[in-house]
């Protein structure tokens, strides 16, 4: 599992590193991925997934991961409790809980791993298409949260245009953009999971202004195994994000992450708290 | 919480009933919802959710539920272990595990509950529309699994047309249909969660034939609270289901459940094992 070996030269691998500590695991927040009230959720999610992938009994590749962000993670170290809830011949179901200073759980994830077998293959979804990565201007990222500077966003549709006051008529929450690590890094399960949380909150697009938000629960499903990802050998993905409803303080977000070859690598959905 | 009070007169409430047994809870499979190798996953999911909703400390309404079906549930009673992983001022994160005869976990769910507050409300998603429920013919359900007979399906698009051999060219995996309990029952969180798993496997539609399948992990997000559902006061929903990819033994499924009024009540996604 070379994908899970931390490469200390990349900030994403440093930020998501875990180390054994007795029968628990340890990690720490990283200034590089600081968000407004704690670490960027995508990096927390990837750290939880890495904590499963480094388990000696872990088999197969991640298939589906649900991450619940219960409360802000405080700057500093954290503990990870990893439990194999159930294994069958071809699947494993894991639970990872993050806590700090012997306190309450701040985040947790459940993850299904599977040994994927050759099968009939069919992709009804149509590649959204975009001008080549190199031809799309980089979205400026000055003056915003640290984590945003760790990524490169090249918007094709649904550019962020946030004003001081809400729009009179809501705009489309749809965006299409190239996504990659600012320091190029080959896309793997960990970065796909983190990419899943990089879409700017859809309510910012719909309202045309920034409001307080927080991801509550995010599910990402992988449609490629490690061999498929190695074959793609890409450092960028084409992402699309949309939203169907905002109601009583919560809105949804759906997303797709595509390899430039036209292969769908992962799909994601999340429920987001907002104040508006 | 009248929604969670079992109504012994309806098979769905009987099938999803749970009773306290010391510091655990107990339930049992129901012949009414038997599927091919165990109970219908939607009813297992609803039972897990009910086990949270009956907890005295449960607050707010279900917001997001992820159910992992690890292995077939055997005919008969089962134990439920319910744990509040984390509570904040406005949210609760729960874990429920189902096991039988002191054995391994066969299914589990995580659920976020929230006290939803009034907010800006906006539904970018467009109601799919359909002829009125009464005007759409009922899909015949003779000779198939018991659970199917507990529901009424009225297909508007993407009718099930399954032959003995796969299609030469894959068909669309999309379906649109009216859904309701065969014995009418007011739609609540439990039935919406169960409806989420009633869509016939998308691979049956794409391949035009039935193959072995099993839901592995399903996430349903509710976009209405108890007051909204009471106001809708409907016994049927309009469902749409689709799929984006089938690859290496797993395919995805996305779904939406709409009130006849045009309000989006729930969205769902799942990853499904298949053999083809």
Image: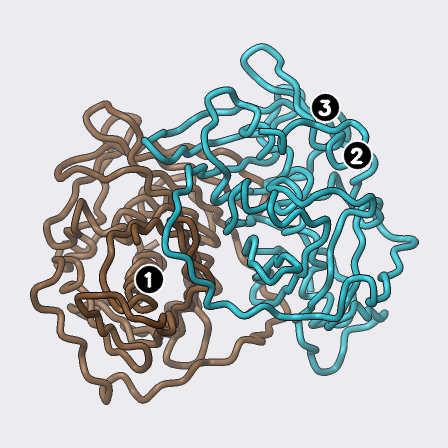
Chain colours: A cyan, B brown
Q: Residue B75 appears in which quarter of the rendering? A: top left
Q: Which residue is mark 1?
A: B203
Q: x, y (%) of residue A88?
A: 32, 31
Question: Real-space Cα distance between discs 3 and 1?
Answer: 45 Å
Question: Real-space Cα distance between discs 1 and 2?
Answer: 40 Å
Disc 1 secondary structure class:
helix
Q: Pointer 2: residues within 10 angstroms few (<14), some, or many (20+)? A: few
Q: Which residue is mark 2?
A: A10
Q: x, y (%) of residue A16?
A: 69, 32
Label 2 vs 3, first from the N-terminus: 2
Disc 3 secondary structure class:
strand
Q: Are the numbered discs 1 and 2 placed on the same chain, yes or no?
A: no
Above or below, A132 relative to A141: below
Disc 2 secondary structure class:
loop
Question: Real-space Cα distance between discs 2 and 3?
Answer: 19 Å
Q: Which residue is mark 3?
A: A77
Q: Is residue A268 visible?
A: no
**Chain for numbered disc 1:** B
Q: Residue A184 appears in which quarter of the rendering? A: top right
Above or below, B215 relative to B153: above
Q: Pointer 3: residues within 10 angstroms few (<14), some, or many (20+)? A: some
Q: Nearer the viewer, mark 2 or mark 3?
A: 2
Q: x, y (%) of residue A45?
A: 62, 39
Residue sticking out furthest to the top: A22
Q: Residue A273 appears in which quarter of the rendering? A: bottom right
């Amino acid at each position: 599992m070379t994908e899970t070996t931390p490469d200390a030269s990349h900030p994403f691998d440093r930020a998501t590193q875990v180390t054994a500590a007795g029968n628990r695991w340890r990690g720490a927040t990283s200034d590089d991925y600081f968000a407004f009230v704690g670490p960027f959720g995508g990096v927390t999610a990837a750290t939880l997934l890495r904590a499963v992938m480094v388990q000696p009994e872990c088999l197969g590749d991640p298939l589906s991961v649900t991450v619940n962000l219960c409360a802000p993670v405080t700057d500093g170290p954290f503990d990870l409790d990893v439990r194999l809830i159930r294994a069958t011949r071809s699947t494993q179901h894991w639970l990872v809980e993050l806590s700090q200073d012997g306190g309450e759980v701040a985040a947790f994830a459940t993850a299904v791993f599977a040994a994927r077998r050759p099968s009939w293959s069919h992709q009804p979804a149509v590649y959204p298409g975009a001008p080549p990565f190199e031809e799309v201007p980089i979205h400026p990222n000055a003056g915003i949260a640290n984590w945003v500077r760790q990524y490169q966003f090249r918007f094709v549709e649904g550019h962020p245009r946030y004003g001081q006051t809400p729009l009179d008529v809501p705009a489309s929450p749809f965006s299409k953009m190239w996504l990659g690590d600012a320091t190029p890094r080959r896309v793997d399960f960990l970065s796909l999971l983190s990419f899943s949380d990089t879409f700017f909150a859809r309510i910012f697009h719909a309202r045309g202004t920034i409001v307080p938000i927080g991801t509550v629960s995010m599910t990402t499903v992988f449609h490629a195994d490690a061999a498929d990802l190695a074959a793609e050998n890409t450092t960028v993905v084409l992402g699309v994000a949309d939203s169907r409803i905002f109601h009583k303080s919560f809105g949804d977000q759906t997303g797709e992450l595509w390899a430039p070859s036209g292969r769908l690598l992962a799909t994601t959905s999340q429920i987001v708290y907002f104040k508006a």
